[in-house]
Image (cartoon, grey):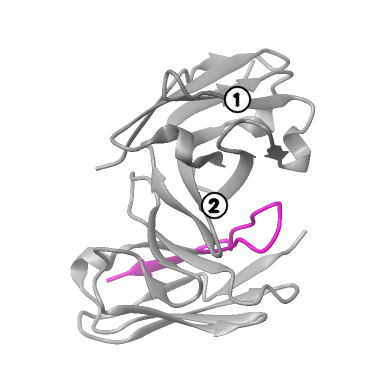
């Protein structure tokens, strides 16, 4: 199974700052990496797929990059509504594993 | 807008069984792979199972293989998860999710979840 790790596990930042989360896979997953946002008490929501493609309707302050085993998720100009936990997920092979999540406090 | 509505979550004793349902609407259900993803309270996300558009292929998390069965009824726009031999560690919110399967694949729509509690 491919193991996914994320860092940091949590962070607190002010409105307007840039936030970066890293995700690492235990083996190469090419660019088969997705990012989800989960707000408290809600279902997850797809933000980015295939490493860097923004899902329709997602604000452009969210972005992603990387390939192979190392990936980055960035929120430019953090907003109050970005309070959430963010998960990376590999779709390279079954089982489709998620990272442990990064909790973002604003 | 895609709608996925889960039901069937309940409190069940260890070793018991439960069947979850997911009613899909506002999209062509038979054209998509579908999935179940779970989340233990306060914990992270864990993929459980996938089923192909025509139900000809199924994939499972190792820890549920042989105990859980994913199925679908395209005529009823419904997805199911039959859970047998339930364990305390199966306690979680279970989400129905649409699996967009192409050159890239991802969970592009999610239901609100249904809670399964396994406890004596």
Q: Do marks 1 and 2 both belong to one polypeptide chain? A: yes
Residue B87 appears in view:
no
Query: Is disc 1 placed on a helix, strand or loop?
Result: strand
Query: Residue at horizontal 26%, vertical 77%?
Result: A60
Examine the image and state in which quarter residue B60 appears.
Answer: top right
By secondary structure, the bulk of the magenta-drawn segment is best described as loop
Of all chains, the one bearing label 2 is B
Question: From the viewer's perspective, is A85 left or right of B82?
Answer: left
Of badges 1 and 2, nearer the viewer stands: 1
Given residues B59 and A8, the one toward you in this image is B59
Residue A66 higher or lower than B6, as above or below: below
Q: Residue at x 20, y 79 (%)?
A: A15
Q: Residues within 10 Å of mark 2 (few under 14, many from 20)?
A: some
* Residue denoted by label 2: B44
Residue at screen point 75% across, 24% down: B67
Q: Is residue B19 magenta?
A: no
Please provide percent x and percent y for residue B10: 49, 17
Measured in 3D between alpha carbons, the distance from the residue under mark 1 to the one under mark 2, in whole angstroms, is 24 Å
Q: Quadrant of the N terminus of chain A?
A: bottom right
- Relative to residue A82, is residue A99 drawn left or right? right
Q: Residues within 10 Å of mark 1 (few under 14, many from 20)?
A: many
Q: Which disc, if any, is residue B71? A: 1
Tell me where residue A47 appears, x and y as whole percent: 37, 64
State which region is magenta. Answer: A88-106
Q: Position of residue B9 (x, y in %)?
A: 48, 21
Q: Could you tell me which quadrant the C terminus of chain A lies in?
A: bottom left
Q: Is residue A20 left or right of residue A88?
A: left
Q: Is residue A67 left or right of residue B77?
A: right
Q: Secondary structure at mark 2?
A: loop
- Point out residue A63 in the picture as x, y percentages from the top left corner: 37, 79
Please name whichever residue, B41 or A28, is drawn nearer the observer in this view of the structure.
Answer: A28
């Amino acid at each position: 199974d491919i193991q996914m790790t994320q860092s940091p596990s949590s962070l607190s930042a002010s409105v307007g700052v840039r936030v970066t989360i890293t995700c690492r896979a235990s083996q190469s997953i090419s660019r088969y990496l997705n990012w989800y946002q989960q707000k408290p008490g809600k279902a997850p929501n797809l933000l980015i797929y295939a490493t860097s493609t923004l899902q329709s309707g997602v604000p452009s302050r969210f972005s992603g990059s990387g390939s192979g085993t190392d990936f980055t998720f960035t929120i430019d100009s953090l907003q109050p509504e970005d309070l959430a936990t963010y998960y990376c997920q590999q779709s390279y092979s079954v089982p489709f594993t998620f990272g442990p999540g990064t909790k973002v406090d604003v | 807008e895609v709608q996925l509505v889960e039901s069937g979550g309940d409190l069940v004793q260890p070793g018991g069984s439960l069947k979850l349902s997911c009613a899909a609407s506002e999209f062509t259900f038979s054209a998509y792979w579908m999935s179940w993803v779970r989340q233990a309270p306060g914990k992270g996300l864990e993929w459980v199972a996938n089923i192909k558009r025509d139900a000809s292929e199924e994939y499972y998390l190792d820890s549920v293989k042989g105990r859980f069965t994913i199925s679908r009824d395209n005529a009823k726009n419904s997805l199911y998860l039959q859970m047998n031999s339930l364990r305390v560690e199966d306690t979680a919110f279970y989400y129905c999710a649409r699996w967009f399967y192409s050159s890239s694949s991802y969970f592009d729509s999610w239901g609100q979840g249904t809670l399964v509690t396994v406890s004596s």
